[in-house]
Image (cartoon, grey):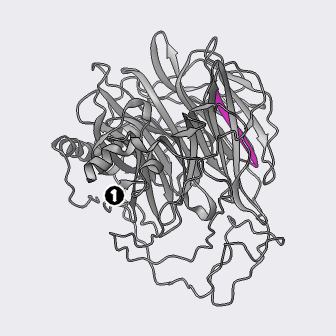
C-alpha cells in the first residue's frame, strides 16, 4: 500500500484518511458482491431511445447535486471502456449542510457497475481520467458543514475504481461561495493541473496548482496571473487539453465594455514549463453591440488535434440563448477563436450546457428552464477550421424535472453517456443513462510541413495541424536536437485486484435497435467505503519550479497560439484600491 508524503492535514482530514484506509477490505468484499449480481437494481424513469437509466446516488440519502463525468478506459487489464461519475449529496440522517462526495464507475459494454464509493465530506467535485486509467478527483471540503470556507482536496482512484489511493490537501484555507463553482482538474502527459475560484478582497480570483508525479505535493497554489489582479478575476473554471496536449482553461470573468461590466467568457493556456498565457478576453463579446449579453454558465471540450469548442449560456433581458465558438488553427493566422454563433433550435430558457467532441461530431446537452424542465441534446458534424457547425434540431432526452447541472461524455466504443439530477417526489437524485454507438473512426491528422531529422526519435504528434500553406512567420517550431532517454522505467504495485470475473451477471440480452436493458444491481442500503488502493503510475513530467522529477520525457512539438483579437479593457482602477492601500 502506498501512502502519501507527510502533509499538514487538519485533524478532520487525518481522521477521515485513517477511516478510508482502514475500510479497504470491506470495500473489496462489497465489490465482489456487486459483480456477482447479488444486489437488487435501482433505476430512474425510462427514457425513450435510451437504456433504462441507473440511479447511481444512494437511496438512503437525498438532495444529490453537482455531477461530473469522465470517459475512458476504466480497466486496462481487460480493455474495458466506460465512465467515472462524481457528485455530492446530503448525508443520510444529516441536515442539508452535511454533504459528502461520492463516485461510481460504469461500463455499458460489459454491464459493469461498481458500488457507490464515498470519498469524504465535501461539495462541487470534478473528475479527470488519464491515459493511464487513473481517475483524479478534486472537491471543496468545507471547514464546517455549510461553510464557504474550507480546503481544496484531491484524491486518485485505482484502475478498477474500487477505492481512493491517497488524499492531498491542495489549499488549506479558501473561500468558494456556491455560485463560484468548485475546482476543475485535468491530467496531462507531464502532470496534473487543478484550478479553483477563491474569494479575497478584490473578488473571486482563479488559483492554480500543479502535481508533477503521483503522490507528490502540489506546487504553485497561487493566483493564475500573479502580477495582474484583474486578469485573475473569475469563477466557474473549465479545463480541456488544447494544442499539443497542454491544459487550456476557460472561465467567466467580469469585463468592462462601454461603461458597463458584464460577465464574459475568457481563455488561457499553459505551455509546458511556462506561465499561463495572456488571456483572450473577447470569446463571447459582440464587438458591434452597445450592451453585452451576460455569460452565466459554460462548457469546454477538445478534439484530437487540440482544437477547442466552447459553449455558454448567454442572457440579455428576457432573451436566453446558447452560443458556441471554436478555437482552431488557420494558416497565416495561427490559433484563434471564431465569431460566436447562436445554436439552432427552440428553447425559451436554455441553460447549463455540456459540450463534448467524439466520433467527428460535436454533442451538446442542455436544460430548458421553462415549462417542465426538460433535458435536450443536439449534435453537429465537426466544422472545418474557422467554420460554423450545422446543428441538428434538439431532441428531448429527459422530459421533465431535471435540476442542477448535467454532464455528457462518450467512451472509446462510441457509447454516449449522460448524467443528470432528477427530482423524484421532492428528492434530487443522480441518474446515469446511455445510448449505444459505433466505434469511432480513426483520426488521420494532416501531414506536417516539417520533417524531423534522424536524431529525433519521435515524429510530429497528431495534435499538430500545420498545413502546406503555412508561412515562415508561423511561431510553431521543431527542436530536432532533443532526444528521448530510453532508460526511464515505470513500476507499479497493485495491492488488491479484482479477478477477471469482475462483472455483473447480466441477464439482459441485447436486441436489435438502440436500446439495451441491463440488470445492474446496486445496493439499496450500501454503506461501502473506499476499496483497495493502487499506486498510481508515475506520469512523465517536466521539472516544475519547486519539484524535481527524475524522469525525462519525449519531446513535444509545441506551438505558441497567436492571439489575434484585442482584449477589451478590464475593471476600473478603483477596484484595486484595497491592494494599493495594502501595498502602500
Along the line of sight, which residue is nearer the eye, 429 or 228?
228
Q: Position of 102 compared to 357: left or right? A: left
The x and y percentages for residue 501 are: 50, 47
What number of labels is visible?
1
Would you say 106 lies left or right of 168 here? right
In the image, is residue 526 part of the stretch drawn in magenta? no
- In percent of width and height, residue 124 lies at 41, 35
Question: Which region shows up in magenta?
Answer: 359-367
Question: Residue 572, position in %: x, y?
Answer: 47, 42
Question: How many other residues sit within 10 Å of disc 1, few (<14), some (14-19) or many (≥20)?
Answer: few
The structure residue drawn at horizontal position 73% and vertical position 74%, both measured from the top left corner, is 473
Vertical side of 426 occupied by 187: above or below: below
Residue located beneath label 1 in the image: 495
Residue 523, position in %: x, y? 41, 27
Q: Secondary structure at mark 1?
A: loop
Asked whether 284 or 351 is in front, the reply is 284
Q: Residue at x 51, y 65 (%)?
A: 189
Pick the quarter of the image with the N terminus.
bottom left
Q: Quadrant of residue 441?
A: bottom right
Amino acid at each position: 500500500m502506498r501512502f502519501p508524503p507527510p502533509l499538514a492535514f487538519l485533524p478532520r482530514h487525518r481522521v477521515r484518511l485513517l477511516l478510508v484506509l482502514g475500510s479497504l477490505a470491506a470495500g473489496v468484499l462489497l465489490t465482489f458482491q456487486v459483480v456477482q449480481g447479488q444486489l437488487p437494481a435501482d433505476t430512474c424513469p425510462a427514457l425513450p431511445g435510451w437504456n433504462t437509466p441507473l440511479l447511481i446516488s444512494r437511496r438512503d440519502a437525498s438532495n444529490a447535486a453537482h455531477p461530473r463525468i469522465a470517459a475512458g478506459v476504466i480497466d486496462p487489464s481487460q480493455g474495458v471502456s466506460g465512465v467515472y461519475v462524481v457528485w455530492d449529496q446530503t448525508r443520510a440522517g444529516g441536515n442539508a449542510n452535511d454533504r459528502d462526495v461520492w463516485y461510481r464507475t460504469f461500463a455499458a459494454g460489459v454491464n459493469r457497475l461498481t458500488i457507490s464509493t464515498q470519498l469524504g465530506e465535501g461539495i462541487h467535485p470534478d473528475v479527470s481520467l488519464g491515459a493511464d486509467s487513473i481517475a483524479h478527483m478534486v472537491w471543496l471540503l468545507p471547514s464546517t458543514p455549510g461553510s464557504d470556507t474550507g480546503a481544496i482536496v484531491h484524491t486518485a482512484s485505482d484502475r478498477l475504481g474500487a477505492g481512493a489511493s491517497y488524499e492531498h490537501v491542495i489549499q488549506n484555507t479558501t473561500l468558494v461561495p456556491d455560485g463560484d463553482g468548485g475546482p476543475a482538474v485535468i491530467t496531462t502527459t507531464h502532470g496534473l493541473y487543478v484550478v479553483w475560484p477563491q474569494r479575497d478582497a478584490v473578488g473571486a480570483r482563479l488559483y492554480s496548482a500543479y502535481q508533477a508525479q503521483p503522490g507528490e505535493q502540489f506546487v504553485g497554489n497561487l493566483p493564475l496571473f500573479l502580477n495582474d489582479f484583474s486578469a485573475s478575476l473569475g469563477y466557474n473554471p473549465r479545463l480541456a487539453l488544447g494544442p499539443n496536449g497542454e491544459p487550456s482553461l476557460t472561465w467567466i470573468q467580469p469585463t468592462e465594455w462601454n461603461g458597463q461590466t458584464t460577465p464574459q467568457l475568457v481563455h488561457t493556456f499553459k505551455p509546458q514549463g511556462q506561465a499561463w498565457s495572456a488571456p483572450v478576453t473577447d470569446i463571447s463579446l459582440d464587438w458591434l453591440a452597445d450592451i453585452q449579453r451576460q455569460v452565466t454558465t459554460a462548457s469546454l471540450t477538445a478534439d484530437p488535434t487540440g482544437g477547442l469548442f466552447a459553449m455558454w449560456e448567454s442572457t440579455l433581458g428576457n432573451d436566453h440563448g446558447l452560443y458556441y465558438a471554436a478555437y482552431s488553427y488557420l494558416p497565416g493566422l495561427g490559433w484563434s477563436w471564431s465569431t460566436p454563433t447562436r445554436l439552432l433550435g427552440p428553447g425559451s430558457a436554455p441553460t447549463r450546457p455540456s459540450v463534448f467532441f467524439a466520433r467527428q461530431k460535436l454533442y451538446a446537452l442542455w436544460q430548458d428552464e421553462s415549462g417542465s424542465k426538460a433535458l435536450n441534446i443536439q449534435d453537429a458534424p465537426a466544422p472545418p477550421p474557422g467554420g460554423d457547425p450545422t446543428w441538428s434540431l434538439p431532441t428531448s432526452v429527459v422530459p421533465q424535472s431535471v435540476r442542477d447541472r448535467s454532464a455528457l461524455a462518450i467512451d472509446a466504443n462510441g457509447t454516449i453517456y449522460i448524467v443528470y439530477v432528477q427530482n423524484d417526489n421532492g428528492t434530487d437524485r443522480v441518474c446515469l443513462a446511455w445510448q449505444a454507438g459505433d466505434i469511432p473512426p480513426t483520426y488521420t491528422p494532416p501531414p506536417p510541413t516539417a520533417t524531423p531529422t534522424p536524431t529525433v526519435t519521435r515524429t510530429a504528434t497528431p495534435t499538430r495541424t500545420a498545413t502546406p500553406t503555412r508561412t515562415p512567420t508561423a511561431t510553431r517550431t521543431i527542436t530536432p536536437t532533443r532526444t528521448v532517454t530510453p532508460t526511464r522505467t515505470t513500476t507499479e504495485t497493485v495491492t488488491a485486484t479484482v479477478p477477471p470475473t469482475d462483472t455483473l451477471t447480466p441477464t439482459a440480452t441485447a436486441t436489435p435497435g438502440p436500446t439495451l436493458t441491463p440488470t445492474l444491481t446496486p445496493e439499496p442500503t450500501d454503506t461501502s467505503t473506499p476499496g483497495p488502493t493502487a499506486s498510481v503510475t508515475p506520469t512523465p513530467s517536466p521539472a516544475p519550479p519547486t519539484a524535481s522529477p527524475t524522469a525525462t520525457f519525449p519531446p513535444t512539438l509545441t506551438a505558441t497560439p497567436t492571439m489575434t483579437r484585442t482584449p477589451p479593457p478590464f475593471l476600473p482602477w478603483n477596484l484595486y484600491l484595497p491592494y494599493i492601500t495594502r501595498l502602500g
